[in-house]
Image: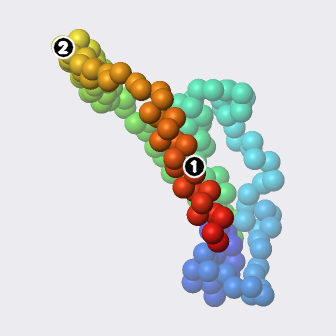
């Protein structure tokens, strides 16, 4: 992006390129960069950057060691001094310890809550059932028949 910005001084914001706007795209020969993305890498660095390598720390270290190779040159093709690679962030065991403590505290609180629920369930008495009245089946059938007769009479009128 820097090479494109240097080749096109009229562009003030590279993120806002209009449709139909003519741009000068510099070639690798004019920028001093090569087409080989692995140029300057050792075989160990190439192995560390391999997709099959699951160690993210090694991949990040190689990326930082290499730096942004495409931006280390000027538009005239003269190489500039490379930036020092960024140091890897130090691991912070205090965060890990705090995270483990938080997880154990949550687990303890959950266990306590479930124990309280179980104790409450044991203490609760079942509700007493209401005494049932004897069922008079003949009376129920008479009432049902009376409702059906009334419905039939209403239907016949209309």
Q: Nearer the viewer, residue 49 or 123?
A: 123
Q: Residue at x 47, y 27 (%)?
A: 137
Q: Is residue 141 left or right of residue 107?
A: right
Q: Residue at x 59, y 26 (%)?
A: 55
Against 154, residue 134 (above or below) is: above
Quick one: SS at disc 2? helix
User: What residue is pinned by disc 1?
Assistant: 148
User: Quadrant location of residue 125?
Assistant: top left
Q: Residue at x 57, y 49 (%)?
A: 148
Q: In the orientation shown, which residue stands out farthest toward the left? A: 123
Quick one: SS at disc 1? helix
The answer to whether one can see residue 124 in this image is yes
Task: Return the x and y of residue 126 as percentages of the image width and height.
Answer: 25, 17
Task: Return the x and y of residue 142 as percentages of the image width and height.
Answer: 50, 38
Which one is earlier in the sequence, the residue at label 1 or at label 2? Answer: 2
User: Quadrant location of residue 42?
Assistant: top right
Q: Is residue 125 left or right of residue 21?
A: left
Please state, as top left, top right, bottom left or bottom right, where the C terminus lies in the image. Answer: bottom right
User: What residue is pinned by disc 2?
Assistant: 123
Task: Return the x and y of residue 6 as percentages of the image width and height.
Answer: 64, 76
CB-based contact (under 8 Å), mark 1 and mark 2: no
Q: Nearer the viewer, residue 76 or 26?
A: 26
Q: Residue at x 77, y 74 (%)?
A: 25
Task: Return the x and y of residue 114 as percentages of the image width and height.
Answer: 28, 19
Task: Judge depth for marks 1 and 2 and give the one in front.
Answer: 1
């Amino acid at each position: 992006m820097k090479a494109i910005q240097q080749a096109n001084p009229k562009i003030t914001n590279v993120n806002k390129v209009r449709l139909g706007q003519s741009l000068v795209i510099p070639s690798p020969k004019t920028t001093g960069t090569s087409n080989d993305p692995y140029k300057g890498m050792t075989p160990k660095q190439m192995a560390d950057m391999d997709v099959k390598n699951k160690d993210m720390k090694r991949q990040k270290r190689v990326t930082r060691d290499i730096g942004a190779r495409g931006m280390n040159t000027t538009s005239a093709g003269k190489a500039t001094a490379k930036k020092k690679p960024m140091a890897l962030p130090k691991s912070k065991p205090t965060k890990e310890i705090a995270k483990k403590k938080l997880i154990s505290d949550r687990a303890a609180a959950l266990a306590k809550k479930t124990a309280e629920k179980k104790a409450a369930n044991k203490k609760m008495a079942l509700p007493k059932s209401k005494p049932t009245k004897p069922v008079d089946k003949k009376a129920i059938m008479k009432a049902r028949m009376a409702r059906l007769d009334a419905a039939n009479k209403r239907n016949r009128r209309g």
